[in-house]
Image: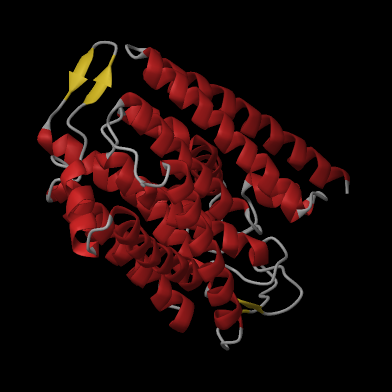
Amino acid sequence: MAWPVWLLSAAFASISFAAALVTCRAVMKLRVVDAPDGVRKTQTHAVPRLGGVAILTGTLLGGCVGLLLLSVVYGINPLQVVAIHWQEISGGRAALLLALAFTAIAFLIGLWDDLQTANTKAKLLLLTASAIAVAALGLTPTALPTPWGNVSLSGLMIAGSALWLLVFTNATNFMDGSNGLAIGATAIMLAALAITGISAGTFVFSVWWFPIFGAVAGFLMHNLRGQLYAGDAGALALGGLFASLGLMSGLEVWTVATLALPFLIDVLLTLAWRTKHGRHLLDAHLDHAYQRLIESGWSHFEAALLYWGLSATAGILAYIGAQAGGAAPFLIFWTLTGAGTLIWLIHRRTAKRNDLTH
């Protein structure tokens, strides 16, 4: 008798959770660490930074063991299980392969930096080239809907998709400066993307989402205590995964962008503020809103909870907009963007006033 889907999903997540826990302990024994630098890296001691490897390993192990579990449950061989699920995504197979390819490239670029401290400009160039390549090969939305009509120029779709991949992937890395914040929030965004896509009929429900969530949960058990960092490999890979799956999700651009707003607002406004004040965009800094909150006395866990809550709120509103249809996704995105910008500016002004009084 076939197991209920929820039980299979829980099994997938549990296997990945356990695998990630074990792998986290293994990579923590390696001598690849993030040492304090007195600028952005403000921890008191060196911390292992190959958590991204643990997340990937946990996800893959969970998926492979889960595949064997499915083959036993349904009495068929693993290749048949893969074939069945491959059939479910007809029409989006090429896009899925491109999404996975971009995620893998982002992971490898990040791993290069984790192991050898890669040149920042070289990393950016490689990620830019990869984003342009997968967009040119077809990882794009069909159109950009607006209340005044759809924009569907091919060149604009490719350029916009490449820019989205580059910006959000890097944004996730920029936000990964507080224990649990970026990885936890991105996992919430991925869950919201899956739920919204499934409800809208653009995604087929699949147990293959759950190894990711289980592996992230296993990693967070160590990361929230400051024992292990995701590194660039983890942050770039999860950011790239969300950005690329968002493009192939079939959801409106505004719905996917709404999910990403907690990161986009902080990162883009911080970069604009640094540009205005003549500060180099590629230099390490502590100017993001979450970093200023921690400097003002917030704990890492409190900052993480805030951004998890913001991500969940954005997810709920994106879901509502997708269900409502019409101009709702467009209006929700720009309303939240305006509100988020106002809050960011108020926080920045308050922080500046506090700096002057101390």
Colour theme: secondary structure
Q: Position of residue 6 (x, y in %)?
A: 47, 42
Residue 32, by quadrant, is: bottom right
Q: Is residue 39 above or below residue 319?
A: below
Is residue 9 placed above or below 56 in the rendered structure? Answer: above
Q: Nearer the viewer, residue 237 or 277?
A: 237
244 relative position to 209: left or right: left
Task: Answer with left or right where residue 189 lies relative to residue 184.
Answer: left
Q: Is residue 202 left or right of residue 64?
A: left
The answer to whether any part of residue 140 appears in the image is yes
Residue 131 locus on image (x, y percent): 25, 54
Camera-side residue: 13 or 226?
A: 13
In front here: 178 or 266? 178
Q: Residue drawn 39% across and 13% down? A: 324
Residue 132 visible here: no
Horizontal and vertical percent for residue 341?
56, 29
Give the total of numbered labels: 0
Which residue is found at the position 54% from the left and 55% from the top? Answer: 183
At x 37%, y 26%, the residue is 199
Left or right: where 348 falls relative to 62? right
Residue situated in front as seen by the camera: 107 or 194: 194
- In which quarter of the view is residue 163 placed? top left
The residue depicted at 50 percent of the width and 19 percent of the height is: 335
- Relative to residue 320, is residue 108 depicted above or below? below
| Residue 1 x, y percent position in the rendering | 36, 47
Question: Which residue, as the protein is rendered here, is positioned at the far right?
Answer: 358
